[in-house]
Image (cartoon, grey):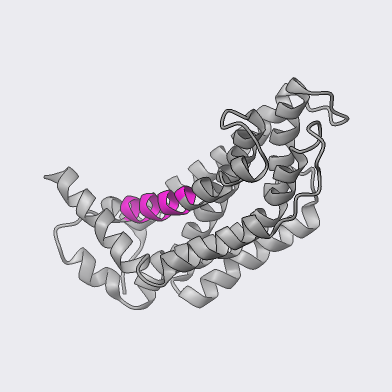
Amino acid sequence: MASNRFFKLIVWEFEEFLNFPILEFLIASTVFLVLFQPITHLPFSTIWENLNRSNSFLVIFIIFIACAVFSRSYAGTLDRGEIKTLLSYPIKRWELFSAKFITQFFVLSAIYLAIFSLNIPLMGLSPFEPMLYASILGLLLHLLVVCSVTTTVSLLIKKETITVLASAIPLFGLETIGGNDSFFTGLGRSNVIFNFFKQSIAVSSESVAFEDFVLAVAFPIVISAVLLLVSLVYFSFIMEVD
């Protein structure tokens, strides 16, 4: 019974917040961004760098798209008063919170994963190319952080437009100021992960210690877990629905 109710919440979330033209726009814009990047590294020894170049654009793109999508789902529901209608049904708050996050994160991840994989035929890569999955790992970890931050800000501000600005602008500023080597930026973490795998299969001028790789992976997971746990507790037991 509980699992059936949770599944219905997921379906409702998808139909309500990823309906036409939102889903189509996400797919089209991601396809454009991936195909827009020119292939500049042709030799086999450096062709992986094309993947890393794509990451730098997608990291910024993910910030604005994920902030807009999650703000619409969480803050938008609170801002328009829809949350009161939903909670009038026999739905637990944690179920609603989880269904929203799982649906939005899964759909965004699936879009980026599928479209980024177009690099396999475009660059003549093998489906088992480790550098491809290193790039995808960096993007998904960055997406997880952005979604977690936006979810937390949404519950605190409860206004869709303000939440988008309050989430996207600081994250974008951090990417701009932090640079390409900081663990606090999505691009920095992606570069560490990418270069760690690269040095293990080819000669590389970028030396990345195993400890740095672990930190680049663990940092976004821990930050996201803390933010989501705090948000879940706040939403389920503390937040008052106006």
The answer to whether residue 3 is left or right of residue 214 is left
User: Which of the 4 image quarters holds residue 133?
Assistant: top right
Residue 125 image point, x, y percent: 64, 35
> Which residue extends farthest right?
205
Q: Position of residue 140 (x, y in %)?
A: 55, 44
Residue at horizontal 27 percent and vertical 51 percent from the top: 95
Image quadrant for the N terminus? top left
Tell which of 163 and 36 is nearer to you: 36
Q: Residue furthest left?
A: 1
Magenta extent? 97-110
Q: Is residue 205 above or below residue 170?
A: above
Instruction: Identify which residue is drawn at 60% across, 42% down.
Output: 121
Q: Is residue 242 magenta?
A: no
- Numbered marks: total: 0
Does residue 229 appear to the left or right of 121 in the view shown? left
Prevailing secondary structure class for the magenta stretch in the rendered image: helix
Q: Would you say residue 226 is visible in this rendering?
A: yes
Quadrant for the C terminus in the image = bottom left
Q: Position of residue 79 (x, y in %)?
A: 38, 76
Residue under the image location 44 percent in, 66 percent down: 24
Q: Tell me if residue 156 can be seen.
A: no
Residue 109 belongs to magenta span: yes
Q: Nearer the viewer, residue 80 or 70?
A: 70
Q: Is residue 38 above or below residue 20?
A: above
Residue 90 position in % (x across, y down): 14, 58
> What residue is rendered at 79% in x and 23% in y?
202
Residue 179 vs residue 199, the one in the foreground: 199
Q: Quadrant of residue 166?
A: bottom right
Vertically, is 36 above or below 136?
below
Taking the image as shown, residue 136 lies to the left or right of residue 190, namely: left
